Image (cartoon, helix red, strand yellow):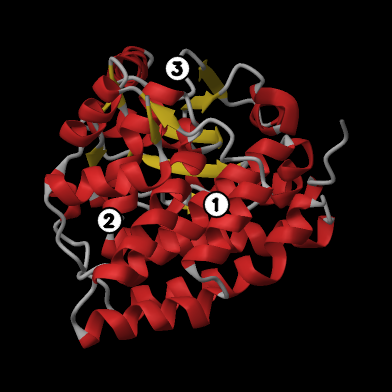
């Protein structure tokens, strides 16, 4: 497949020339050279070693192995090319190696916003075990939207929904600022205008959807994610849903639960604003998920429900505008999951 990304490769090489690294750690999936960035390094005659040995939902141990490789090979610059997993692994490698070297991130999906956030989402034997530090925010990001050309339809669906959820959760967050809310608003406006075109592979939507993802990332970098993300991780583990699917389902029904149970005028106003800005109500967002085929396997055993409820990290929900106890959490899961 031909990617029309010469200008992005030139931008990439310009940054590398300016930084003058002696050896680069190249973090990417095993199909890492499809976009030409590894070749662009080789063309500059700079030493480079690839690190590709990590999972789609990367384990802490994999990032630690990457940190050992970086130190062993005396790398002084990191390039990360890929979706959220590759970018998060690169950030975690920097943290675990306790180094101040720079990271250049090239996202290849429109969803995670990992290229602009202080978080690295990792797992420990399947359970979420993330890390965070302002020191791991990539120093450079290249938004090569041509890479979206080869993104499968399902990945367009779920990564785009992840960006939507980031924006909404950051807008709801009690930690939101005027800056983060502006990022949320801009991101949601782009989502409303371009998401459907993006799903139809309208190439004019590529750049604005990548911008949508970036803005959503900037929003959560300030305000953080809230209850939908906290409740999504066990669904991913137990049901195998993609992250974007799991978090979108949780957001849709948390939104409905909040609307039905909120009692403060401030929160009622925030929910009304969300509908106006996003163009969705809880019902219409649920319908979108149904139309996208994301509601075909919504069932849990009683044991799985208990694991989901007890597995929610309540500490991750303190910035949510409505406080939930475990009874609330169970009610929300039951509102959209059939319990066998």
Is 244 rendered above or below residue 198? above
Residue wearing tag 1 = 161
- Provide residue 6's location: percent of width, then percent of height: 80, 46
Q: How far is the residue under mark 3 from the one under mark 1? A: 24 Å
For this view, does 129 lie left or right of residue 280? Answer: left
Q: Could you tell which of marks 1 and 2 lies nearer the N-terminus?
A: 1
- In the rendered image, which quarter is residue 126 located in? top left
Residue wearing tag 3 = 54
Q: Could you tell which of marks 3 and 2 lies nearer the N-terminus?
A: 3
Q: Residue at x 69, y 24 (%)?
A: 33
Question: Of 266 and 136, which appears nearest the observer?
Answer: 266
Give the foreground label among 3 and 1. 1
Is 16 rendered above or below residue 179? above
Residue wearing tag 2 = 226
- Provide residue 269's location: percent of width, then percent of height: 32, 86
Residue 322 image label: none
Q: Secondary structure at mark 3?
A: loop
Q: Could you tell which of marks 3 and 1 lies nearer the N-terminus?
A: 3
Q: Which part of the image, by quadrant, shows the C terminus?
A: top left
Is 127 rendered above or below residue 19? above
CB under 8 Å between callouts 3 and 2? Answer: no
Is 313 rendered above or below residue 272? above
- Provide residue 156's location: percent of width, then percent of height: 66, 44
Question: Of 314 and 79, which appears nearest the observer?
Answer: 314
For this view, does 88 lie left or right of residue 81? Answer: left
- Provide residue 51's location: percent of width, then percent of height: 48, 17
For this view, does 219 lie left or right of residue 320? Answer: right
Q: Residue at x 18, y 82 (%)?
A: 264
- In the rendered image, which quarter is residue 257 located in? bottom left
Can residue 136 be seen in the rendering of this structure? no
Can residue 87 be seen in the rendering of this structure? yes
- In the rendered image, which quarter is residue 300 located in? top left
């Amino acid at each position: 497949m031909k990617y029309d990304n010469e200008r992005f490769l030139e931008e990439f090489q310009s940054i590398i020339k300016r930084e003058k690294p002696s050896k680069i750690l190249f973090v990417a999936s095993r199909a890492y050279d499809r976009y030409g960035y590894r070749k662009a390094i080789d063309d500059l005659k700079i030493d480079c070693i690839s690190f590709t040995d990590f999972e789609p939902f990367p384990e802490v141990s994999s990032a630690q192995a990457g940190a050992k490789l970086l130190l062993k090979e005396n790398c002084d610059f990191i390039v990360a090319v890929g979706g959220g997993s590759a970018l998060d692994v690169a950030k975690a490698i920097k943290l675990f190696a306790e180094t101040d070297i720079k990271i250049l991130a090239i996202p290849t999906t429109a969803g995670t916003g990992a290229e602009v956030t202080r978080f690295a989402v990792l797992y420990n034997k399947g359970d979420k075990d993330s890390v965070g530090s302002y020191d791991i925010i990539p120093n450079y990001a290249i938004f090569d939207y041509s890479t979206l050309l080869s993104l499968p339809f399902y990945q367009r669906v779920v990564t785009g929904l992840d960006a939507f959820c980031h924006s909404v959760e950051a807008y709801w967050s009690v930690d939101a600022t005027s800056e983060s809310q502006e990022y949320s608003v801009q991101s949601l406006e782009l989502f409303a205008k371009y998401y459907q075109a993006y799903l139809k592979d309208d190439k004019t939507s590529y750049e604005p959807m990548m911008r949508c993802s970036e803005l959503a990332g900037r929003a959560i970098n300030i305000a953080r994610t809230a209850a939908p993300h906290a409740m999504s991780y066990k669904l991913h583990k137990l049901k195998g849903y993609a992250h974007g699917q799991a978090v979108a389902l949780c957001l849709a029904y948390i939104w409905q639960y909040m609307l039905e149970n909120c009692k403060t005028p401030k929160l009622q106003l925030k929910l009304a604003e969300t509908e106006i800005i996003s163009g969705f109500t809880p019902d219409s967002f649920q319908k979108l998920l149904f139309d996208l085929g994301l509601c075909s396997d919504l069932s849990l055993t009683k044991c799985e429900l208990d694991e989901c409820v007890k597995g929610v990290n309540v500490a991750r929900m303190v910035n949510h505008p409505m406080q939930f106890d475990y009874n609330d959490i169970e009610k929300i899961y039951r509102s959209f999951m059939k319990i066998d």
